[in-house]
Image (cartoon, coloured by chain):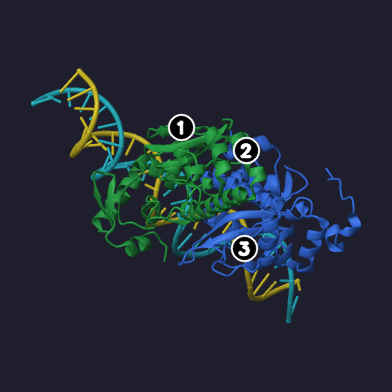
Chain colours: A blue, B green, C cyan, D yellow
DNA sequence: CTTTTCACTTGATCAAAATCAAATGGCGCG
DNA sequence: CGCGCCATTTGATTTTGATCAAGTGAAAAG
């Protein structure tokens, strides 16, 4: 389902932005051509290897980003090394926590990714004079809050099997920005990352994958490639009746 | 530490608002006297018994609220009845999820409380023409998101003991709107609610309370009244080094 | 004053997931 | 091709917290 481009004066828009896959769904979509030009002057696209850190827990935030392609994981670590993924962001999500100096989380690429960085200060300035932009960011924050709360139910009350099924369902409904639900996909996370997302160990995650495979809820090839013959059935396994 | 009232034309402000404990910290604080009057025309204060429901999961949102006094819990339930508290809100928090029709969560008073209700439509209209108001709501959403993510780490990676200690620390730092940290307080939640907040059973919560008491981390009277002789020590038990 | 009720505690046992320990199976590389 | 490296799986055992089952104690009701 292709989204139609609606720009009246496409020529006013920076070249890189014109071709940007993330522009219409992301925060840039609410900017005027002039604002887009201003932001673009200070922005730069970067390719990130899987595992590359965007920002670390406790670091000073100097940049925000838009995710152009790929999946970024947001993690929190305890002093003794225990780790929890507290969010997964997909293109064309905005990446950043407005209005604070120090990042409370680590953000790193879960898959090979591409992001567009721009200085915190430039966007903060833009937000102040563009209510539409703040509205967009507000909506994204609320979406992330809804997702975080959904996940709290999963972390607090679901069994290991339900957690793994919930994760698979989440991925099926989020990996492809074009489609809301797909039945064949590649997992953007390793078993270790999945464990950190679900509050489990990698062994438990692996055993639940095996169990779901043996019960024909999913099919797996090469550890990463998954297909779901019956999405309703997966949802039931996830505890979402 | 009393906050100084800064109104220039106090007489322009509705009488109920003038005396309102929540006004300066809450969303109303960013409104002009005229806007406050408009909102006040449609708003009404209500006392809520402990357990009273503000809105139910799946219901249509017709009102937003400000919490004047008390603690409100936000819960999610699964089809089979398993339940998870996904947020606790304290005075003078705003209560509501802007921009959606149907509530994804249940909100109910955890303690005897007082709220100020106003129609969703009136505030939504006000938000559209008041960037300051949207900014305030945006900040609150981000605060709640930070809290939700902190809690995800607790739910996913902490032991029962650390969870209970984390809960006690959270309460010590949130029950009193005037003070950021107090050492003697009443628990606003029953053991059952604490269990639903921590993703544990009431038996496990009870056992951990007993253990913390025996190790002199806390003192308990009448099940609800808690004192913390050494807050640093409690923090260490909570795993926040 | 006694009884009932309800929230909480305590105890015994069980089960789910963690931990410890190997085995397997690609995949890149000399 | 064979080797070593990782990620993943599988197996055996242990641990943590859940479940099942009584107790306790304080406050409300009779």
State whether residue A87 is above or below residue B33. below
Q: Position of residue A128 (x, y in %)?
A: 67, 58
> Label 3, label 1: how many angstroms apart (C-alpha)?
37 Å
Q: Which residue is mark 3?
A: A107
Q: Position of residue A174 (x, y in %)?
A: 69, 48
State the image quarter where residue D30 is shown: top left
Mark 3 or mark 1, which is nearer to you?
A: 1
Q: Is residue A169 visible?
A: no
Badge 3 marks a residue whose secondary structure is strand
Are the numbered discs 3 and 1 placed on the same chain, yes or no?
no
Q: Earlier in the sequence, mark 2 or mark 3?
A: 3
Q: Which residue is mark 2?
A: A235
Q: Position of residue A6 (x, y in %)?
A: 86, 47
Q: Residue at x 40, y 33 (%)?
A: B47
Q: Is residue B174 visible?
A: yes
Badge 2 marks a residue whose secondary structure is helix
Q: Which residue is mark 1?
A: B53
Binning the other alpha carbons within 10 Å of mark 1 as few (below 14), some (14 to 19) or many (20 upward) gives some
Badge 1 marks a residue whose secondary structure is strand
Binning the other alpha carbons within 10 Å of mark 2 as few (below 14), some (14 to 19) or many (20 upward) gives some
> Label 1, label 2: how many angstroms apart (C-alpha)?
29 Å
Judged left or right of residue B6, residue A43 is right
Mark 1 or mark 2, which is nearer to you?
A: 1
Q: Residue at x 81, y 63 (%)?
A: A37
Binning the other alpha carbons within 10 Å of mark 3 as few (below 14), some (14 to 19) or many (20 upward) gives many
């Amino acid at each position: 389902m292709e989204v139609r481009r609606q720009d009246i004066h496409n020529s006013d828009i920076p070249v890189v932005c014109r071709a940007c896959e993330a522009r219409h769904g992301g925060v840039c979509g609410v900017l005027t051509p002039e604002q887009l030009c201003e932001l673009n002057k200070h922005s730069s696209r970067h390719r990130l290897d899987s595992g590359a850190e965007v920002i670390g827990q406790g670091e000073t935030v100097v940049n925000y980003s838009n995710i152009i392609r790929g999946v970024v994981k947001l993690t929190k670590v305890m002093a003794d090394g225990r780790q929890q993924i507290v969010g997964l962001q997909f293109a064309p999500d905005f990446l950043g926590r407005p209005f604070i100096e120090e990042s409370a989380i680590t953000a790193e690429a879960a898959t090979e990714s591409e992001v567009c960085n721009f200085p915190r200060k430039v966007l903060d300035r833009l937000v102040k004079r563009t209510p539409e932009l703040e509205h967009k960011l507000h909506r994204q924050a609320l979406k992330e809050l809804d997702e975080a709360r959904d996940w709290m139910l999963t972390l607090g009350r679901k069994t290991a099997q339900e957690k793994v099924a919930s994760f698979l369902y989440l991925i099926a409904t989020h990996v492809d920005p074009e489609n809301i639900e797909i039945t064949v996909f590649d997992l953007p996370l390793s078993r270790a990352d999945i464990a950190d997302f679900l509050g489990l160990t990698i062994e438990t995650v692996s055993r639940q994958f095996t169990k779901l495979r043996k019960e024909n809820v999913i099919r797996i090839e090469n550890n990463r490639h998954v297909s779901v013959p019956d999405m309703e059935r997966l949802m039931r396994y996830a505890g979402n009746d």
